[in-house]
Amino acid sequence: MKLPKFLTKKLLPHPRWGVISIPYVWMLVFFAIPFLIVLKISFSSQAVAIPPYTPILEYVDKGLMLKLNLGNYIELFTNSLYVDAYVSSLKIAAISTFLCLLIGYPMAYTIARMSPSMRNICLMMVILPSWISFLIRIYAWMGILQTNGLLNKTLMALGLIDDPLRILNTPIAAYIGIVYAYLPFMILPLYTNLVKFDMRLLEAAYDLGAKPWKAFLTITLPMSKAGIIAGCMLVMIPAVGEFVIPELLGGPGTLMIGRQLWSEFFSAGNWPMASAVAIVMLIMLLIPIIIFHKYQQKELEGRVA
């Protein structure tokens, strides 16, 4: 029996809803549900059990009793170790993001101004290292930065230094590793923005007597603001929670919240404390994401208007 058309439209969802729902289902399965599980663990207490934490909801005397442990969050904001780890992570991520912008902007601008054939080759060179395992590339930097590594040998052979420099297991090595690993995430959004830039605007500025540096500051830089913000978000957000680079390159002197999170989970076995650390870190990272999203919405509304 075939249903009437008006009933089919009301009862059956439109095909486009299937497409629209995909990102929402993805967010629910891979973000919302894991977030709620970690949030639940963060309000529990450490226990010698499997899993190693107490339940927050118990059935007692024919009723449900909710027990929330706020001690983990109090410890986070009263223990200087965690506070210093958060501050250090933000500082390292901010400086690394600035260095990526400083290096990535000229590279993206140069690639955007090249011929299409050369542009594709240069973009391939930017993306190519990402095809190799991230861990292998960081291990390679350990070989480059160590006392008898490639960098020190080259500098000594050129006569620039007499004794090898101690770079590995210092914060400088962590900065080098983070900038190297996340530089493509800065270059690609900047390139996408700069390649659409109308060069006639610069030519008009030059005709009116503007110097190159002034034309750059008043025309090129403001018009590439969206690419700068996108690149900074893509670099800073993962850099804050970075674990592998500070662990392998930074050494014990490089305090970052990612290392502290790993220590709580695997060394101390304190899942509730580690979950609280992860929740606070996630909230810290959500703030710039929300700001960026609002900025993008304003940009789109301005273009439509």
Image (spheres, rainbow, N blue to C red):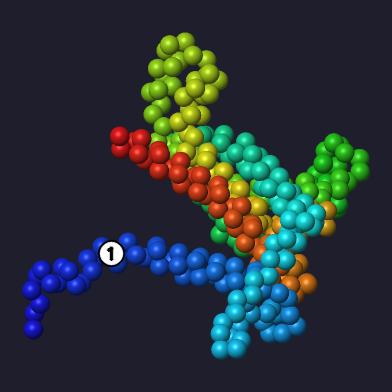
Crowding at dot 1, Cα within 10 Å, few <14 / some 14-19 / many 20+, comes out as: few
Whether residue 142 is situated above or below residue 63 in the rendered picture: above
Q: Nearer the viewer, residue 250 or 138?
A: 250
Quick check: 274 above or below 231?
below
Q: Where residue 227 appears, x then y in whole percent?
A: 49, 40
Q: Is 161 positioned to the left or the right of 275 in the image?
A: right
Residue indicated by mark 1: 17
Toward the bottom, the furthest residue is 62
Q: Residue at x 41, y 19 (%)?
A: 203
Task: Please indicate, yes or no, whether residue 246 appears anywhere in the rendered image.
Answer: no
- Drawn side of residue 22 relative to residue 258, left or right: left
For the image shown, how many numbered marks are present on the structure? 1
Label 1 amino acid?
Answer: Trp
Quadrant including the C terminus? top left
Q: Position of residue 244 (x, y in %)?
A: 70, 60
User: Image point 40% across, 63% down: which residue?
Assistant: 24
Taking the image as drawn, is residue 50 in sight?
A: yes
Residue placed farthest to the front in the image? 61
- In which quadrant of the rendered image does the N terminus lie? bottom left
Front-lying residue, 14 or 253: 14
The image quarter in which residue 263 lies: bottom right
Element class at badge 1:
helix
Residue 273 lies, in percent from the top left, at 71, 67
Q: Nearer the viewer, residue 7 or 73?
A: 73
Query: Is 121 placed left or right of 165 in the picture?
Result: left
Return the x and y of residue 148 as percentages of the image width and height.
85, 53
Q: Which residue is at the front of the view, 160 or 97?
A: 97
Residue found at the far top of this picture: 209
Left or right for 91, reference 205: right
